[in-house]
Image (spheres, rainbow, N blue to C red):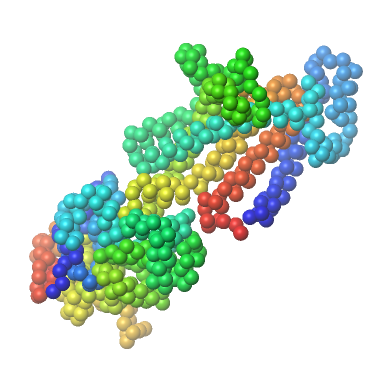
Amino acid sequence: MAENLLAIEDLKTYFYTPSGVVKAVDGVSFSLKKGETLGVVGESGSGKSITAMSILQLIPSPPGKIAGGRIVFNGDNLLEKSEEEIRRIRGNDISMIFQDPMTSLNPVLTIGEQLTEVIVLHQKLDKTAAAARAAEMLRLVGIPEAEKRLKSYPHEFSGGMRQRAMIAIALSCHPKLLIADEPTTALDVTIQAQILELMNDLKDKFETSIMLITHDLGVVAEVCDHVVVMYAGRPVEYADVETLFEAPLHPYTWGLLASLPKIEERGKQRLEAIEGTPPDLRHMPTGCAFAPRCSKAQTVCREKQPLYRQVREGHYVACHY
Amino acid sequence: MTRYIIKRLLGLIPVIIGVSICAFLLIHLIPGDPARAILGERATPESLAAVREQLGLNDPLHIQYLRFMGQLIQGDFGRSVITNSLVIEEFAERFPATMELSIAAMTIAILVGVLAGVISAVKQYSWFDNISMIGALFGVSVPIFWLGLMMQWLFAFKLGLLDASARLSVELRLDNITNFYVLDSILTGNWEALFDSLKHLILPSLALATIPMAIIARMTRSSMLEVLRQDYIRTARAKGLKEKVVIFRHALKNAFLPVLTVMGLQFGTLLGGAVLTETIFSWPGIGRLMYEAIMQRDFPVVQSGILIISLIFVFINLVVDILYSFVDPRIRVN
């Protein structure tokens, strides 16, 4: 069994707002093995992105603060590192791509400038060598006429090409971990498939592990090895992708799976939806956070928070049943 | 690019016509007889008639305007009715003084304003932010003539550090090449004059810089705050870049655009509007020339002054528009 590249243990990231403490991430634990793709799924506000931002300590502070837990990467706890040490890890050992390629690139710098700056910074190459590496990266992500394109500005690129450029920037220092925060959400479906395929190819080429944040279970089924399902700032279920799709244990996971449209039921009925809305993160219910929306909820669910426990080898769930 | 500039220059024509009509009508907007207004109550009928003849006031209005424009196109801006010297020569002589003062003021305003704005945005709600924004509010609200007088009193009369009026001490000689005294001192190697002209330049340029500095600081702060929230700033941080690089390379370049607009407008205003500062500091620039012309009802000088200042203003904004395309590739014109 491959060793853990990243292990998050009981991570707590809180936002101290005037209207109360928002516990955006409240006790998240999961791990990611070398070479695997881990899917992190959950609806908006479930703490997926905040977890990812916490890893690189990009949480805007104030109001955000990592209030507890450990983030162990390659054997070191990142939360104990200095700002300077974290900076050397960002973009180098761990890099990140974001949801909206239209706004994630700086509009007044050329693609080449944005690409070479990270190479010069971490790889200590001179300008010429960095430019050569940059052109090579653009070719790798499938951008034609790479040398010429280095001089282009982001507005001269289409959405899909910008995300390719983002991937080129993220992978240019051959990171051990790539955090992809909804990398395909803003793209249309054909481009989505291309970008996912590209990420998969480059993952093998660079021996990079991927943490893929998404709310799209179709994407998860396609590319992930393991999945962690998050709800209201906590993980509710973790399993390998087959188990999760075939034998999900948590009612929230059932709900997510049921809400996927199925071709054989087309036109016959409305899409399944999970009743209700996620809880206010400032005023969490005492028991299970999902209890108010759960069809199977019992008295104990409303009174006691369920433990996140291992029910079978490699299958974790936080549910009383 | 050349085509763009030509297009913009052609666009100036209606502006010039509009301004020229305003400047031309000025002489007719004051109540009563312009000739009497120039010469005063006790003028003889003969001298009144002579001035009317000189200004061409006996012709119908549209003929007067056409003549006015015809002379302008030939570069004839008329003669002062007080000194009888050519208006264009008076302006040419005074212009470098105003230019020197404005450039000095603008340099101070940009350096201090942009830096204060950036630090305020990065350290939002810190003591620095609070103090500099209160300072900026003071800067836009304080009457310049009052501030100028206070500065003269403190630095020139009480402390004796700087000079309060004129461009150079009377006992000093300086060969004029460009009429920019600081530049001329350097060109002729006259270090005593350089030191002296700088001592004269500091107070008026500080006074003149106050308003643009405050506006630029506030503009930079709000623009930076907006940019710092953008996704690409998060990307820059996620790359592991130093905060300094994130702020100055990634954020400031984006935040600079609206600031550039303000700079252009302010610079134009400075060039034309240094009237108060030049008057208080006895600075022999076009602001003071205009002030004197207005006081003496020297209409040809006032008319041409308005035209020339408007043209400079429009020209500076054209330069800013062209600079835009260097800062923002999205509006780069082919």
Against B260, is A37 above or below?
A: below
Residue A191 place in picture, x, y as percent: 41, 74
The front one of A212 and B285 is B285
Q: Is residue B277 visible?
A: no
Against A182, is B234 above or below?
A: above
Residue A219 place in picture, x, y as percent: 31, 75
- In-image side of B215 versus A287 (left or right): right
Q: Residue at x 13, y 74 (%)?
A: A1
Q: Residue at x 46, y 34 (%)?
A: B112
The tally of labels here is 0
Residue A91 place in picture, x, y as percent: 31, 59
Q: Is residue B93 visible?
A: yes
In this view, the residue farthest toward the bottom is A264
Image quarter in which the C terminus of chain B is found: bottom right
Q: Residue at x 37, y 36 (%)?
A: B129
In this view, the residue farthest toward the front is B189
Q: Residue at x 79, y 17 (%)?
A: B40
The front one of A190 and A319 is A190
Residue B138 place in picture, x, y as percent: 46, 29
- In-image side of B210 versus A168 (left or right): right
Image quarter in which the N terminus of chain B is found: bottom right
Within the image, what quadrant is residue B306 found in?
Answer: top right
